[in-house]
């Protein structure tokens, strides 16, 4: 994930926001181009502990020096600094509005809105009067609720979650799923996107109905492979509801929002009448029309609407070990446990706490969370050793050329906590290691058993060696749009040559390489020879190209034969076979083009990515099955052609190529589940 692409796998995420990431945005572009032109064995969760783990267990920060001339973090300096950045950011990137709130030492240091909450009405953004949708930052409320019930003895983080549910999670693996796995994003579920966001209230469903009807398959054993899961978070919210005896929305209000005096925040959808006028409009771009309110179906995963000032209350509470203005929402030992690393892919890289994820930067251990809906994009960062919290949210995606929230956060850190990264000696085996890790990798947060599995192949991460001994990875790009270069600083551990991001590698229990990124809630697993896009994309590209040429040349050759008086020398049976083969090719074209078109349209009209769109998927799949029948006919026709000694050799070769191309298409289709009978995804 150019750091933005990785970061966009953090959030809620809506299908559109999610698939603008490594898989969908790249996947649809590549697949559309093709169609139109021719288990990680990581450090397991630590046992339940009432004290923080040692600093060595929390990962080692890169030794660095602090340059002279550090700016003093005063309200005046922060205001002048951000006022010099934010208006230009919004204007250059076609963003309507944004808000930033910063807390320091238990108080609000800075809070300000920029731009407009409603472009048409010129309504300005204000930190205390404008609601933003922070997406998956909402999960921190759900995790806080879980920890409240844990400290009261009503929940056990290590207990099988089936004990708290009124339905059963299948025993796919011997190990049961526990809340600790869910809070570290290691329950092992595949990605689920259907009914994630609704466009209107009538498409909403009760939380219990959602978790029962949309359970994804388990593809990893729990506690082993991180794979970010909105579904698992929704299930945790349902457990809060069942164990507490309160409706989820009531629980969040009564035990978190009200005690923290977050009077202008809610998880309810639609918004309560008292808050509705405060809601910022959402935009793809400021220059485009405003969008309707987004309904997040799995509410515990991302339905909150908050003001920036209210978010300062949550940040202060977590920075002060669960206390805000004399009210203790978490006991100190519970808050410390929640903020302590519980799972790590590699010891020298960022890990997962209970709900929070780590971000080591500028010499400080940072915990936080990011979030995206379709139109709102937010980050929350806490630096416990500095008692500092930083919240930023944008109401537009803008041009999407760079990560605006990342840019302003890094600029803030570099101003007030600057460091000089040390030179590291070259690793003797750097050149050999670069070749070892080069290859294609598939993200662990993926669809594996559903009809959307095909997006994985087009979005594989390609890691390759550079001539200077560094490595690069596709889609991991710098702010200038150029691929980042990573230099090996320890065996199979790399750091960005210009910045602080790391990329590490380890082997799973089968000896396969796993790429570990600085975002600890997912990894990239080495693709097998068959799942490798280096094979699969040329396979579908060439095969589909021949199918298209077969159809395009059909009328051309018919006209040519008629023009030159050269009729086909075929009997009636051969003519029928030839016609069926061409019709089968047409069905293949309609199927593949229709499939990509459906997914692309689903990004613009989310109602298609609900059961309402199933009738269209079934119709598209009908052409797929007709094409599959056409493939069988093509193979039969090719065999008959080669058995006919009187048939021209080039005609035989043509028939064989058509048959092989049809087989190639359906080897791709069946490998990536495009004809999967289930429309649950």
Image (cartoon, rainbow, N blue to C red):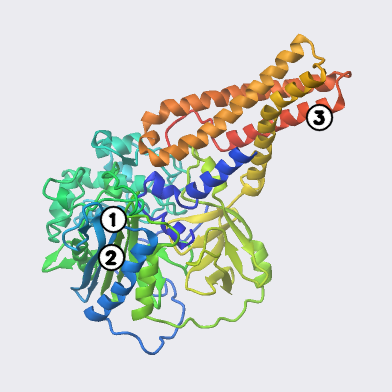
Whole-percent x and y of residue 559?
73, 22
Whole-percent x and y of residue 582?
67, 23
Residue shown at the point (55%, 34%) measured from the top left: 593
Callout in the foreground (1, 3): 3
Instruction: Say few, some or many: other residues with alpha carbon within 10 Å of mark 1 (under 14 / 14 to 19 / 20 or more).
Output: many
* Above-or-below relation of 29 to 585: below
**Mark closer to the chain start, 1 or 3:** 1
* Above-or-below relation of 65 to 334: below
344 on left or right of 159: right
Give the SS element for disc 2: strand
Whole-percent x and y of residue 316?
21, 68
Q: Does residue 137 show up?
A: yes
Return the residue nearer the eye: 148 or 630. 630
The image quadrant that residue 213 belongs to is: top left
Q: CA distance from mark 1 to mark 3?
A: 59 Å
The label number, if any, that marks residue 134 in the structure image? 1
The label number, if any, that marks residue 653 in the structure image? 3
Residue shown at the point (35%, 38%) measured from the top left: 195
For mark 2, what is the residue? Answer: 391
567 on left or right of 474: right
Residue shown at the point (52%, 66%) measured from the top left: 503
Give the SS element for disc 1: loop
The label number, if any, that marks residue 11 in the structure image? none
Return the residue nearer the eye: 559 or 368. 559
């Amino acid at each position: 994930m150019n750091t933005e692409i990785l970061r966009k796998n953090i959030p809620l995420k809506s299908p559109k926001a999610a698939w603008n990431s490594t898989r969908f945005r790249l996947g649809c572009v590549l697949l559309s181009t093709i169609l139109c032109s021719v288990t990680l064995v990581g450090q397991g969760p630590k046992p339940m502990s009432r004290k923080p783990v040692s600093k060595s267990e929390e990962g080692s920060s890169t030794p660095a020096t602090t340059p002279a001339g550090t700016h003093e973090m005063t309200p005046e300096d922060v205001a002048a600094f951000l006022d010099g950045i934010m208006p230009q950011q919004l204007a250059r990137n076609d963003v309507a509005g944004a808000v930033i709130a910063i807390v320091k030492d238990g108080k609000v240091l800075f809070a300000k809105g920029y731009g407009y909450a409603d472009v048409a009405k010129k309504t300005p953004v204000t930190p205390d009067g404008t609601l933003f949708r922070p997406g998956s930052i909402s999960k921190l409320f759900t995790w806080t609720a879980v920890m409240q019930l844990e400290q009261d003895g009503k929940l056990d983080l290590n207990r099988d979650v089936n004990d708290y549910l009124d339905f059963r999670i299948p025993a796919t693996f011997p190990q049961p799923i526990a809340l600790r796995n869910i809070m570290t994003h290691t329950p092992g579920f595949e990605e689920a996107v259907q009914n994630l966001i609704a466009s209107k209230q009538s498409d909403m469903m009760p939380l219990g109905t959602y978790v029962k009807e949309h359970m994804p398959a388990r593809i990893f054993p729990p506690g082993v492979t991180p794979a970010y899961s909105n579904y698992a978070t929704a299930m945790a919210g349902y457990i809060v509801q069942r164990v507490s005896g309160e409706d989820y929305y009531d629980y969040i209000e009564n035990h978190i929002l009200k005690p923290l005096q977050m009077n202008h925040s809610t998880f309810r959808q639609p918004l309560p009448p008292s808050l509705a006028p405060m809601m910022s409009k959402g935009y793809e771009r400021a220059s485009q029309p405003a969008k309707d309110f987004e309904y997040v179906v799995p509410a515990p995963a991302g339905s909150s609407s908050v003001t920036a000032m209210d978010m300062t209350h949550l940040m202060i509470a977590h920075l002060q070990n669960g206390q805000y203005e004399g009210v203790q929402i978490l006991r100190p030992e519970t808050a410390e446990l929640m903020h302590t690393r519980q799972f790590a892919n590699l010891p020298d890289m960022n890990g997962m706490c209970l709900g929070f994820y780590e971000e080591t930067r500028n010499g400080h251990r940072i915990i936080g969370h990011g979030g995206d809906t379709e139109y709102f994009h937010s980050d929350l960062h806490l630096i416990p050793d500095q008692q500092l919290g930083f919240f930023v949210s944008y109401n537009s995606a803008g041009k999407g050329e760079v990560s605006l929230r990342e840019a302003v956060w890094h600029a803030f850190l570099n101003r007030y906590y600057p460091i000089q990264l040390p030179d590291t000696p070259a690793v003797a085996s750097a050149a050999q290691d670069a070749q070892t890790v080069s290859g294609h990798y598939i993200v662990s947060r993926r669809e594996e058993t559903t009809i959307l599995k095909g997006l994985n192949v087009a979005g594989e991460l390609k890691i390759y060696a550079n001539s200077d001994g560094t490595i690069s990875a596709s889609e991991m790009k710098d702010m200038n749009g150029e691929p980042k270069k990573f230099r090996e600083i320890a065996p199979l551990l790399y750091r960005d040559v210009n910045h602080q991001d790391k990329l590490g590698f380890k082997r799973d229990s089968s000896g396969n390489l796993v790429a570990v990124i600085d975002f600890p809630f997912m990894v990239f697993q080495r693709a097998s020879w068959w799942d490798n896009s280096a094979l699969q994309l040329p396979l579908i590209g060439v095969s589909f190209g021949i199918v298209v040429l077969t159809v395009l040349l059909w009328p051309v050759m018919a006209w040519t034969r008629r023009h030159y008086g050269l009729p086909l020398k075929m009997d009636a049976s051969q003519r029928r076979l030839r016609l069926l083969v061409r019709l089968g090719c047409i069905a293949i074209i309609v199927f593949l083009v229709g499939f990509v078109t459906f997914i692309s349209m689903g990004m613009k009209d989310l109602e298609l990515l609900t059961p309402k769109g199933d009738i269209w998927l079934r119709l598209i799949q009908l052409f797929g099955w007709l094409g599959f029948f056409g493939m069988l006919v093509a193979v039969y026709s090719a065999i008959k052609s080669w058995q006919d000694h009187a048939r021209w050799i080039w005609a035989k070769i043509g028939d064989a190529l058509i048959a092989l191309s049809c087989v190639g298409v359906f080897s791709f289709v069946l490998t990536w589940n495009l004809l999967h009978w289930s429309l649950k995804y």
